[in-house]
Image: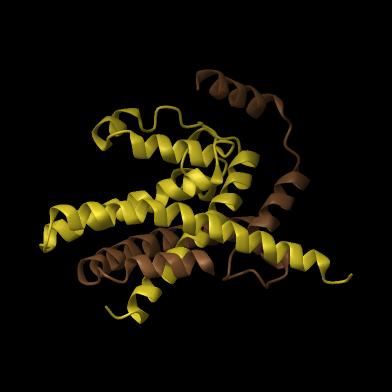
Chain colours: A yellow, B brown
């Protein structure tokens, strides 16, 4: 069975994409039904607020799929649930003082929860974060392509 | 939450991190980056991998922004097809 291993990898990546799609679509359709219930038309600021909500839904659904064992997912969900005003007070409370080179520091600021991780955890979590984020992007692309190709 | 934090702090200081471990993780990270995925890992410095990682994450964040906008616009224009789309996506 030379191909069994790659088949398993393929299956895993497909099923993880499926879980991303399912979780995102569930929340996405909720936005959709709320929108059509309250607003018939979409003025520009409405559109902006709505795209902000879609963005939050995208990040929170990917954090939920990744699960609570992932430090970045916990940090991201916490960040999304905490109001921005409160967040500024809490930000940068505990940044490790040792940052041997600047790139590590930049990565820390980019990864949710990265500022409190040791270097090994930071790299591991980053790899998982990139994987989840790119899957989320693929799912969102697929949904918007579907929208475009399906006329009303 | 606080216990988790203190645990990770302890492990951060007590766990001895070897260069091999770091190199291993860095090359794993490199595999995920489309820009430098196919270069031989000994030809790419760790700093370069980290730099590309940051760029890639920023690009993905930007893509999420753009796609959110696009989906928001699409929601405003197309209404009836939604149920069919969801169904077809779940069937795939």
Q: Residue at x 52, y 50 (%)?
A: A103
Q: Residue at x 51, y 41 (%)?
A: A72
Residue A34 screen position, x and y as percent: 23, 51
Q: Is A118 placed left or right of A143 in the picture?
A: right
Is A9 positioned to the left or the right of A54 in the image? right
Please tell me whether residue A123 is drawn above or below residue B87 in the rendered image: above
- Quadrant occupied by the C terminus of chain A: bottom left
- Where A84 sits versus B65, above or below? above
Q: Position of residue B63 (x, y in %)?
A: 39, 65
Using the rendered view, name the quadrant where residue B58 is placed: bottom left
Q: Nearer the viewer, residue A3 or B10?
A: A3
Location of residue A76 with respect to A56 vertically, above or below: above
Q: Position of residue A133 (x, y in %)?
A: 49, 56
Instruction: Answer above or below: position of B37 versus B1.
Output: below
Give the camera-side residue of B5 and B41: B5
- Residue at the image position 52 percent from the left and 67 percent from the top: B91
Residue drawn at x 15%, y 57% is: A46
Quadrant in which the N terminus of chain A appears: bottom right
Question: Residue A76's image quarter?
Answer: top left
Judge left or right: residue B91 versus residue A140: right
Residue A138 seen in render: no
Image check: A31 left or right of B27? left
């Amino acid at each position: 069975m030379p191909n069994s291993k790659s088949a398993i990898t393929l299956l895993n990546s497909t099923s993880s994409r499926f879980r991303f799609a399912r979780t995102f679509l569930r929340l996405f359709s909720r936005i959709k039904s709320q929108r059509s219930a309250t607003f018939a038309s979409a003025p520009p600021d409405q559109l902006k607020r709505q795209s902000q909500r879609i963005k939050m839904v995208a990040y929170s659904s990917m954090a939920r799929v990744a699960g609570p064992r992932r430090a970045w997912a916990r940090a991201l969900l916490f960040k999304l649930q905490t109001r921005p005003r409160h967040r500024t007070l809490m930000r940068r409370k505990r940044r490790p003082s040792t940052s041997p080179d600047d790139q590590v520091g930049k990565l820390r600021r980019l990864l949710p929860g990265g500022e409190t991780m040791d270097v090994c955890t930071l790299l591991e979590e980053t790899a998982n974060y990139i994987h989840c984020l790119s899957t989320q992007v693929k799912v969102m692309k697929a949904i918007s392509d579907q929208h475009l190709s399906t006329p009303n | 939450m606080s216990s988790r934090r203190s645990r990770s702090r302890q492990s951060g200081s007590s766990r001895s991190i070897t260069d091999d471990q770091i190199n291993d993780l860095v090359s794993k990270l490199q595999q995920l980056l489309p820009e430098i995925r196919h270069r031989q890992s000994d030809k790419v410095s760790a700093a370069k991998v980290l730099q590309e990682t940051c760029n890639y994450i920023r690009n993905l964040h930007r893509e999420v922004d753009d796609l959110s906008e696009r989906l928001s616009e699409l929601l405003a224009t197309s209404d009836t097809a939604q149920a069919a789309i969801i169904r077809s996506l779940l069937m795939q």
